[in-house]
Image (cartoon, grey):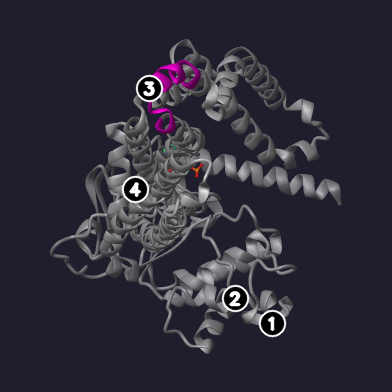
Amino acid sequence: MFYGKKKKNDVRELLEYGGSRKWLTFLGLALSALSMLLTMIPYICIWLAARDLIAVAPDWTRAENVPQYGWMAFVFAAGGIVLYFLGLMCTHLAAFRTASNIRKQGVSHVMKAPLGYFDANASGLIRGRLDAAAADTETLLAHNLADIVGTVVLFTAMIVLMFVFDWRMGAACLLSAVISVIAMFSMMGGKNAALMAEYQAAQDRMTKAGTEYVRGIPVVKIFQQTVYSFKAFQQAIEDYSSKAEHYQADVCRGPQSVNLTFTEGAFVFLVPAALFLAPGALAGGNFAGFVTNFAFYAVFSAIISTALARIMFASAGTMLAHTSLGRINKVMEAPTLKVPKNPQRPHGNKVEFKDVSFTYDGGQNPALSHVSFTAFSGQTVALVGPSGGGKTTAASLIPRFWDASSGSVEVGGVDVRQIDPHVLMDQVAFVFQNSRLFKASVLENVRAARPGATRDQVLEALKAAQCQDILEKLPEGMDTQIGTEGTYLSGGEQQRIALARAILKDAPIVVLDEATAFADPENEVLIQKAFATLTKGRTVIMIAHRLSTVVGADKIIVLKEGRVAEAGTHAELTAAGGLYARMWADYNQAAQWKLASEKEAE
Ligand SMILES: Nc1ncnc2c1ncn2[C@@H]1O[C@H](COP(=O)(O)OP(=O)(O)OP(=O)(O)O)[C@@H](O)[C@H]1O
């Protein structure tokens, strides 16, 4: 009655998340509807009492049934309240289960997403979406839905009762309700809908600009800017204020006054109608009945404002269902990693790219085009090339952050898509620039790579990754929680801990980004040592940013605009005089400049 087909489906879809407790929602709604019916009965009792009193007036003592009606009214009112609470209990139980299922199903779905999905969808964002959706659904199912059903019952009962005793007085009461509803909808429809849309768009722009502003506060502080430097935010606020004022003053003032007057004043038409009908009733000889009916409508009209207020809440509830479902669907739309039906085991630790092309979702150009190369077991292959050449993308395809659009990436002679993801993860360790550490102890952070590892094994890995100095300065050694006050680690230190994790994993294939952007010279030496330990005796695919680290590589693949521009050893490529040779010459020149400027400074 109050919402269209689409919204109904939203609610139905949300209810599906209730699983085995879905029936509790329906029971709760039925109880809520029944409770609403019971709370109508006291009004009938009032009518009966008024009828008896008026019939015997002024000798009130003869109205023997009045106390009985009073008790009846009390029992039904109390019964209505009890049923309402029982109904709420049911809807709450169902709502808690539904919200928890939304969280569980959402999390288990995103767990199946390829790791690359989390680059564009930060885990905080996903969690935020799920939390908001679960909270909204909880409110909707625990309260709003019961209220919507209650409102439908209330409205139906109200209309029936209005016409049962005296349809003319009922119509008079209803008229004010109708005017009130028309006034309410006139604020939302016609040309006002466009104004409302503009007003909401201005509100969205202001929220967006506000978020941008808060995000940019560090920059504002560094550059000594004031809030006014954020013109967009200021303009958005001003635009919103003027739209809001315009909407309130020109659109809402009139209809809102009408709405309030008629919502709260159902008498407006009832009293004139009664005065108009009174002479007829007198002449007809049933004046007592007429007064009884008037008393009933005078009391009953109070219910109209409650019913109208409920309509507003009901529409808010359906909007909640819509946004909630939208959020859930956003999480559920995450692509999932295809798991092979008949997984094959890799034979050995060779990594091979066979004519691999890959385009990011929504990307204009392929990030990789027909890339082929092989890293034989125990070899180190370095990926070099200009920024945006496709190095990170190529490395990401090995642990299946993404799957190749065409061609295949093979590990141990088997397409990675045909390997059980757990087996693949055991086979490959990866250390990327953004390898994150959890808010947990150093021990737990490193042990995440091999949950069964002993303390000594973790310590050994930390030592191999040159982390002794980090452990010494932490108050509780490797039991210190990272990220708690006073225990923040520098980028280089974090990278060494991430390396310890990879060393502990002891996987035969290592994919690593050697970027030492964070590292100071001391850290850099330590990181290089940790790299040496990690890569010894393994198949290594290394994203190299500084050419000094690739000189000893078994093979260098030069990627430019997603294609293999050149491939070979350092000696072969420098001799060939191509892109790599130019990069090498530039690199050496830059190193010499650096040396010369350091000498000058001395
Ligand atoms: N998540 C992404 N979505 C869309 N396009 C992307 C994404 N990541 C990278 N790209 C694009 O793919 C191409 C290759 O990027 P990639 O990061 O692999 O290059 P790179 O050689 O590692 O660069 P750098 O040395 O700067 O890290 C670039 O054009 C880049 O803009």
Residue 572 % position (x, y): 40, 48
Do the numbered discs 4 and 1 sit on residues whose CB atoms are within 8 Å? no
* Magenta portion: prevailing SS class: helix
Task: Identify which amino acid the numbered label 4 is placed on.
Answer: Ala
Q: Residues within 10 Å of mark 2 (few under 14, many from 20)?
A: some
Q: Residues within 10 Å of mark 3 (few under 14, many from 20)?
A: some
The residue segment tinted magenta is 274-289
Which is in the foreground here, disc 4 or disc 2? 4
Checking the image for residue 168, the label placed there is: 3
Residue 11 % position (x, y): 32, 44
Question: Which quadrant holds the N terminus?
Answer: top left
Q: What residue sits right under mark 4 in the picture? A: 334
Vertical placement of 178 versus 453: above or below? Answer: above
Task: Identify which amino acid the numbered label 3 is placed on.
Answer: Arg
241 in the magenta segment: no
Vertical placement of 353 versus 497: above or below? Answer: above
Residue 406 % position (x, y): 22, 42
User: Does residue 317 appear left or right of residue 343 in this picture?
Assistant: right
* Residue at 49% in and 35% down: 295
Residue 98, image quadrant: bottom left
Q: Secondary structure at mark 4?
A: loop
Q: What residue sits right under mark 2 in the picture? A: 441
Q: What residue sits right under mark 1 in the picture? A: 476
Q: CA distance from mark 2 to mark 3?
A: 77 Å
Q: Secondary structure at mark 1?
A: loop
